[in-house]
Image: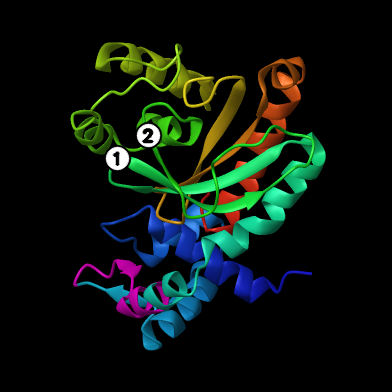
Amino acid sequence: MAVKSAERVLQIFELLEGAPGGMTNKDISQSLGFAPSSTLGILRTMLEYGYLMIDEGKRYSLGGKLVRLGDIAASRFDIGKMASPHLKHLMNALEETCFLAVLSGDEIVYIAKEWCEQTINTNANIGSRKPVYCTGLGKAFLAFLPEKESREIIDQIDFEEYTHKTVRNKKDLEEQLKQFRMQGYSIDDQEIEEGLWCAAIPIYDGSRRMVAAISVSGPIERMLSKKDKIISELLMTGKKLSEQLGYH
């Protein structure tokens, strides 16, 4: 059961997160539906402990102490460890191999994997690297990173053909990325390995920045036969992990 006063403190933090110019006691009270007198008491306590700041116009904003706490929390995040139970659940639900990867330059690096015995062997292992332009995980980064960052990566790509279906140029890649942005997930249709089909989704942190991607991969015939279930489970898993990382 939620403690009312603690709940109000958290609501104030979330409200001020979206108010870079700060808000007065009256603004906060009206926005949250609190009595101004009780809200003022909470604000003064948060101010005293360094969690809020106040300016000459009596507008409250997030305080410097939160920066220090945020840095400490971020340093203790092990996204691979946090993702492990989500990947395991996804693998059991879909009976296909699941991966977590991060971006490194114009490559993705696999940092977690839940292998399913019935899937085909792949040379994607923890620590290995793959190109961004022909993998589901890499395309997730290109599609869902801020446009400027994505563009800088794309401009550096030296397109190499891995299979007869590998995307061969910037124009075709950009057409794929437009589709991926609309549908909310990316696809690798036998572009890095023959017979392998993969879908991937972005993972975001509390600053709403994409920090990783999750994928499910397996033999194309089997994957396409349950595509709707794969996408549904994948999106649900991505949402849960992103929320655990502070995204909302």
Residue at coordinates 60% horizontally, 23% vertically from top-left?
A: 197
Whole-Å distance between the Cαs marked 2 and 1? 6 Å
Rate crowding at label 1 as few (under 14), some (14 to 19) or many (20 or more) other CA atoms within 10 Å: many
Location of residue 132 (image quadrant) = top left
Location of residue 164 (image quadrant) = top left
**Magenta residues, start to end:** 56-70
- Local SS, label 1: loop
Give the amino acid at mark 2.
Val
Judge whether 225 appears above or below 219 on screen: above
Q: Mark 1 points at which residue?
A: 106
Q: Name the residue under label 2.
A: 132
- Local SS, label 2: loop
Q: Could you say where residue 68 lies in the image, as x and y percent from the top left? A: 35, 79
User: Is residue 63 in the magenta section?
Assistant: yes
Q: In the visual, does 67 lie left or right of 228?
A: left
Residue at coordinates 78% horizontally, 41% vertically from top-left?
A: 117
Give the amino acid at mark 1.
Asp
Residue at coordinates 47% horizontally, 55% vertically from top-left?
A: 127
Question: Which one is in front, 191 or 38?
Answer: 191
Judge whether 210 appears above or below 127 on screen: above
Question: Which one is in front, 93 or 67?
Answer: 93
Rate crowding at label 2 as few (under 14), some (14 to 19) or many (20 or more) other CA atoms within 10 Å: many
Judge whether 75 appears above or below 238 on screen: below
Residue at coordinates 23% horizontally, 27% vertically from top-left?
A: 158
**Contact (Cβ within 8 Å) of mark 2 with mark 1:** yes
